[in-house]
Image (cartoon, rainbow, N blue to C red):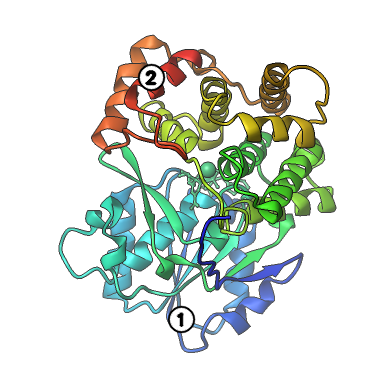
Amino acid sequence: MLNFDFYNPTHIVFGKERLNELDKLVPQNAKVLITYGGGSVKKFGTLPKVTEALKGREVLEFGGIEPNPRFETLMNAVDVVKKENIDFLLAVGGGSVMDGTKFIALAANYKGNDPEKILMGGAGTVEEAVPLGTVVTLPATGSEMNMGGVVTYNGGKLVFMSPLAFPKFSFLDPTLTYSLPKKQVANGVVDAFVHTTEQYLTFPVDGRFQDRTAEGILQSLIEIGRKTMDEPEDYDTRANLVWNATMALNGVIGSGVPQDWATHMLGHEITAFYGVDHGQSLAIVLPSLLRLRKEGKKAKLIQYAERVWNITTGTDDEKMEQAITKTEEFFNSLDVKTKLSDYGIDASGIDLMIGGLEAKGLKALSETRDITLDVSRQIYEAAL
Ligand code: NZQ
Ligand code: ZN
């Protein structure tokens, strides 16, 4: 097992009808800014429940954080935080609202006049941040219990990380996710699935807890994925999606093992140039990436075939191929398509996406840094 630090300070409040407990967890004298997205939290009644729980306090609202949140929008919120002397941020929404709020928390205390640098490796220079909490309405990203975020700047999706971005608390009430369209539920299943494979399908380091836990998450998602799309209000099924999605990216399964975030990096380019949903972009990249990197991932791919998909006969190569096909079929069973052409993208788009990777210096991705721009090109080509 590799050396690691594990630190995760987020208090999880899980279950239905618990939003009244917000009053205990938001600091008593804090002036609060509630952040939200395009309005689903108003339409489906979550925002009124949150404001009711905080009644009698000084609370302001900032709406309009878009999917794949934009730097400019978030900087408008930073102005509000500064002007109004906000001392607590409460994100009510999905990954985009949570990520955007983490950025606002850091940017409000950024010393220079180039806050975009936070998105270019500068998050570590921020020494203080506005504390934040979240109320999750979309199970997918794990943002509710991690220190990362993704913001769209200058047409590209940029990742930042800071321990100051960990939410103080996150409310996970599965019933708040019942209103999600099927497509967003499917995206969430795929996102959590791929977060797990990116920390599991690398090379073995005898991380037994991490491997068995990752396999448990993958099998749970396979069991519940379609069911929770078809029966959105089956509480236990949805509760399982919510908790699996959180555990897939809160540091637990990734500690002490190699990681390969290439699927996300290649996926971000598809979203940046073509507006394809985050989950869909991952479903396009993962199968092609696994096929192209079969040799480097051989031991773990065979383990994945045997333990996750119960494929126990055939040659090593047949097992790996069957497991990749099963993965593709699983995404398709959630009505998530796995080819670029399914989203209207043809070969002419590949240069653009390779250019995007190059501009960010993403020229040596994967657990062994062998996904060069050339290999990324082959992955996109294989996904046409
Ligand atoms: O904006 P509103 O009106 O709220 O509508 C949203 C949005 O249109 C809607 N929605 C959310 N909750 C709903 C709902 N609709 C009905 N009922 C509800 N309960 O869903 C749409 C998508 O929301 P979004 O927040 O964009 O989705 P998601 O949670 O998938 O987040 C995606 C973003 O997270 C980033 C992605 O790159 C992307 O920008 N990621 C963040 C990560 C992290 N912080 O660790 C890791 C992930 O890999 C990912 O990269
Ligand atoms: Zn993701």
> How far across and how far down the image is residue 34, in percent?
47, 67
Q: Earlier in the sequence, mark 2 or mark 1?
A: 1
Q: Disc 2 vs disc 1: Cβ atoms closer than 8 Å?
A: no
Q: Look at the image and tell me in which quarter the N terminus lies.
A: bottom right
Q: Above or below — where is 254 with respect to 308?
A: below
Location of residue 170 (image quadrant):
bottom right
> Which residue carries the number 2 mark?
377
Residue that label 1 marks = 58
Rendered view: 20 above or below 324: below
Rendering coords of residue 59 (x, y %): 46, 76
The one of 5 and 123 positioned closer to us in this rendering: 5
- The residue located at (82%, 53%) in the rendering is 235
Quick check: can you spot residue 322?
yes
- Amino acid type, label 1: Glu
Residue at the extreme left: 113
What's the amino acid at mark 2?
A: Arg
Per the image, label 2 sits on a secondary structure element best described as helix
